[in-house]
Image (cartoon, grey):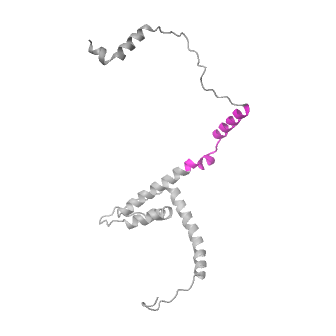
């Protein structure tokens, strides 16, 4: 008895059956009948063409207001905030504009970096990472807060209740 016949009878059967089958030779490619096809009505085709035309004719202002552009701007702001916060945590000296930028755009991150600040005997002095657009935006935010905060603080002070006097430690 041959060991190949015992271990692999299916291989032998495949080779024998492959030799017996006549192979068909096709001279040209014929399309299959069971392929997917898409048919559109004239109205649907006109609508798709119009949408494509409008997409190509977008103005730069419309593209700038797209959600993707907004996400890119937010990501750049977050990246700058992270850099500023890491410098602050290391105990390095950062420009006051950078510190204000972090306070305005991510106050919780600013407080966290201040609470985790390490004492650095030889702090590195950094240049500002903000560009002109960021500085203009920061100035506009500061001018808007200073104009609005004076009126709010004066109004809130006039409506603030009088503080109750503290009498003694034993009284509740």
Q: Quadrant of residue 55?
A: top right
User: Percent x, y for residue 56?
Assistant: 63, 38
Q: Which residue is depicted at the point 55% across and 64% down?
A: 141
Q: Quadrant of residue 98?
A: bottom left
On screen, 107 above or below 37?
below
User: Percent x, y for residue 105?
Assistant: 50, 61
Provide the residue span drawn in magenta: 42-69
User: Percent x, y for residue 25?
Assistant: 51, 9
Q: Which residue is depicted at the point 44% across and 64% down?
A: 110
Q: Quadrant of the N terminus?
A: top left
On screen, 8 above or below 95?
above
Q: 147 or 55, which lies in front?
A: 55
Q: Main secondary structure of the magenta part?
A: helix
Q: Which residue is depicted at the point 61% across and 78% down?
A: 155
Q: 100 or 69, which lies in front?
A: 69
On screen, 132 above or below 62?
below
Most extreme residue toward the right is 43
Q: Is residue 70 left or right of residue 12?
A: right
Total of numbered circles in the picture? Answer: 0
User: Percent x, y for residue 26?
Assistant: 53, 10
Magenta-span inclusion, residue 63? yes
Q: Is residue 73 left or right of residue 56?
A: left
Q: 5 or 55, which lies in front?
A: 5
Q: Quadrant of residue 14?
A: top left
Magenta-span inclusion, residue 123? no
């Amino acid at each position: 008895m041959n060991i190949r016949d015992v271990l692999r009878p299916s291989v032998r059967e495949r080779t024998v059956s492959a030799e017996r089958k006549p192979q068909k030779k096709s001279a040209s490619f014929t399309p299959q009948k069971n392929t997917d096809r898409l048919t559109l009505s004239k109205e649907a085709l006109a609508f798709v063409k119009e949408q494509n035309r409008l997409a190509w004719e977008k103005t730069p202002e419309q593209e700038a207001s797209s959600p993707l552009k907004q996400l890119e701007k937010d990501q750049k702001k977050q990246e700058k905030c992270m850099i500023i916060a890491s410098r602050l945590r290391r105990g390095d000296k950062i420009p006051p504009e950078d510190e204000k930028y972090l306070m305005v755009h991510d106050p919780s991150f600013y407080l966290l970096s201040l609470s985790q600040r390490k004492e650095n005997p030889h702090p590195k002095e950094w240049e500002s990472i903000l560009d002109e657009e960021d500085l203009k935006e920061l100035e506009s935010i500061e001018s808007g807060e200073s104009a609005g905060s004076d009126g709010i603080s004066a109004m809130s002070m006039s409506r603030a209740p009088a503080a109750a006097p503290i009498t003694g430690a034993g009284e509740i």
